[in-house]
Image: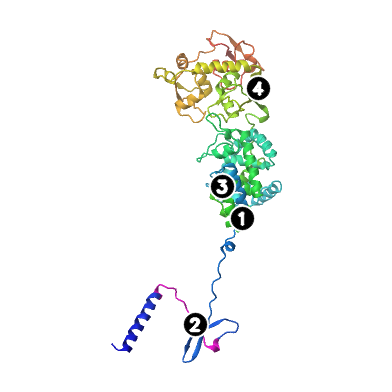
Amino acid sequence: MTLVSKHIVVLFFVVFGLQLHAQDSLTVKTTKLSESELVAGENYVIDTIVDGKAFYKKSIEPLKQIDLTKELEDHELASEIDKKWMEELYSTSLFDTIYRDVTDLKYKAVYYPELSTDTLKARLERLNARTPFNVEYNPQLENLIKRWLKTRHQSMERLMGLSKYYFPMFERELDNYDIPLEMKYLSIVESALKPRAKSRVGATGLWQFMFATGKQYGLDVSSYVDERSDPIKSTKSAATYLARLYQIFGDWDLALAAYNSGPGNVSKAIRRSGGYTNYWNIRPNLPRETAGYVPAFLATMYIFEYANEHGFIQHKPQFNYVETDTIHVKQMITLDQVSEFTGVEMEKLQFLNPSYKLDVIPYIKGKNYTLRLPRDVVGKFVNNEKEMYAFAKAEFDKREKPLPQLQNADTKTRYKVRQGDYLGKIARKFGVRVSQLKQWNGLRSNNLKIGQRLTVYPRNPSAVTKAASKPKSTVNFKGTTYKVKSGDSLWSISQKFSGVSVQDIKDWNDISGTRLKPGMTLRMSKS
């Protein structure tokens, strides 16, 4: 092969190789310019020279070296928030925060002609003027308010009735910590004012504290007691937590969002929004449940604040907070025993004392456990305190029996629920506890239905025969009777007969409530 041929072959492979390599490279289009085509002010370099004539191309500026410490600088405010919150985490071991599932909120347009858009805007503007929360009109909030007005009227009325009991104690604690009083509506979004409400992730109580959060903020959680369900103690802890969040964010809307999703998610939303600190500006960058959380809070606030305008009937609560008082217990006692001794229905005691998980008030040295009672019963309890505790002790001594003996199959019976029955009454009938009735029958609440059959292992076997037989009529009753007069009450009647309690009268006459009719005849003894 000649020297010329070798050069041709080498040139072929070089060109062919460059073409193959170019298939995997970016194609760069270059334009060769003659000297007459150059533009003044631009930078050019010589690209090639053909027959002594130079051709030019635009010069390419090299990339600047990136200073990572400058280019990746964090947002100053968001970084400061993270720093403060991390100090809180390490000082309190608090990590998990309170979550509420509000992802199912519907924002579709709702036809509700009773509330025009202009009227709603005007009312929201007035509401915004008297609260530190940012209450601004938007179509989603309007649709949510109208949907709840249309579909949740009855449930809202029930909540308004309950709020008459809870809100006074909430407002007192919130005011002590300089928290906006409107924050009381948060408890409705969190728990629907159910002290024993428990979410799927374990958040418990009116303010939905997680276990670790509750412990960190001073709420005792043990086998007997869960103070996350205590209305006053949990409100103090929620106020402390919210006050801390406000110190960090300086904005109540953001504090509310952080209460739900955690401060970390809020600071991330601030970054992603470019540094905005208004809730509605960072809302698209918040977790979905938090994006619906604040609108749910604002919708609740609106409905409660304008309840009269929308025709809500605010029912009188079973108790007003001022009509109750507390007593420090001096030894272990059960709500069953208190009910039997005082005549207060078990369900009322459970409502007033929701933090006692087993309906047992323990006595532990160094701890301070209280019993809340209707105010008109407190004096009677205190005046007869020694007898009460003696009665409780005797009851506990009586119950100290081996479990197998208690649940012997031979003593098992089935009881049919009758009109006027409730768990406390049935428990007393068979000498057992309400908690045992629940355990034996898999009951999660205190609700019973007439005709429902319950499995019972009675401590008093003779109660089986008594329960199975029909109660004797008052007409054929040979024992002591009393004819009700105008103005009589169960309490006043019980005082006329030595050794007779209100509960005795209820049990002997199958009375579930406290209403009496003049002229009716009551049995005043067992037989």
Residue 472 drawn at (x, y percent): 50, 13
In the image, farthest residue toward the front: 3
Residue matched to label 2:
31
Distance CA(mark 4)–CA(mark 1): 53 Å
Earlier-in-chain disc, 4 versus 1 = 1
Q: Nearer the viewer, mark 3 or mark 1?
A: 3
In magenta, the rendered stretch is: 22-37
Residue matched to label 1:
281
Distance CA(mark 3)–CA(mark 1): 16 Å
Q: Amino acid at mark 4?
A: Val
Residue matched to label 4:
378
Earlier-in-chain disc, 4 versus 2 = 2
Q: Nearer the viewer, mark 3 or mark 2?
A: 2
Distance CA(mark 2)–CA(mark 1): 48 Å
Image marks 3 and 1: residues in contact by CB distance under 8 Å: no
Image marks 2 and 1: residues in contact by CB distance under 8 Å: no
Earlier-in-chain disc, 4 versus 3 = 3
